[in-house]
Amino acid sequence: MLFSDALLLTAYTESCKMNPMNKQYDARKISWNSQRIQALRQHLKLTQRELAERLGTRQQTISEWETGMYQPRGASATLLSIVAEQSRFKYTT
């Protein structure tokens, strides 16, 4: 497993305490488009179902993000940012 659920929850909890101006986990600064989400999932070597389980969402949601039907918002975008940072996924803002 590339990141543990406990570590993910801890990182998310800590990110909520951070100053909103902190770039590291500021989901508003990162546009999670379909290509970026798919690239992150592939970087993690996960299936859509596996990523959904780790994020606490449905596989269909990951599919909808990757096809561009919807974009992650709020906590989902923050979690994607945390996972990206922890996995050293290189993305541009």
Image: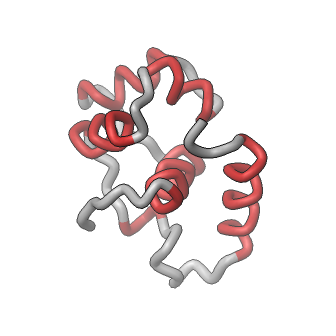
In the rendered view of the protein, which quadrant contains the N terminus?
top right
In this rendered view, identify the residue nearer to me: 24 or 61.
24
User: Residue sitting at 47 percent across and 46 percent down?
Assistant: 73
User: Residue sitting at 35 percent across and 23 percent down?
Assistant: 64
Q: Position of residue 3 (x, y in %)?
A: 61, 45
User: Which quadrant of the figure has residue 56?
Assistant: top right
Identify whether 88 is placed above or below 69: below
79 displayed left or right of 4? left
In the rendered view of the protein, which quadrant contains the C terminus?
bottom left
In this rendered view, identify the residue nearer to me: 85 or 78.
85
Q: Position of residue 82 (x, y in %)?
A: 54, 57
User: Which quadrant of the figure has residue 14?
Assistant: bottom right
Q: Position of residue 31 (x, y in %)?
A: 31, 56
Q: Residue farthest to the front?
A: 1
Number of marks in the image? 0
User: Residue sitting at 69 percent across and 43 percent down?
Assistant: 4
Q: Position of residue 50 (x, y in %)?
A: 53, 23
88 displayed left or right of 54? left
Identify whether 41 is placed above or below 90: above
User: Which quadrant of the figure has residue 68?
Assistant: top left
11 displayed left or right of 81? right
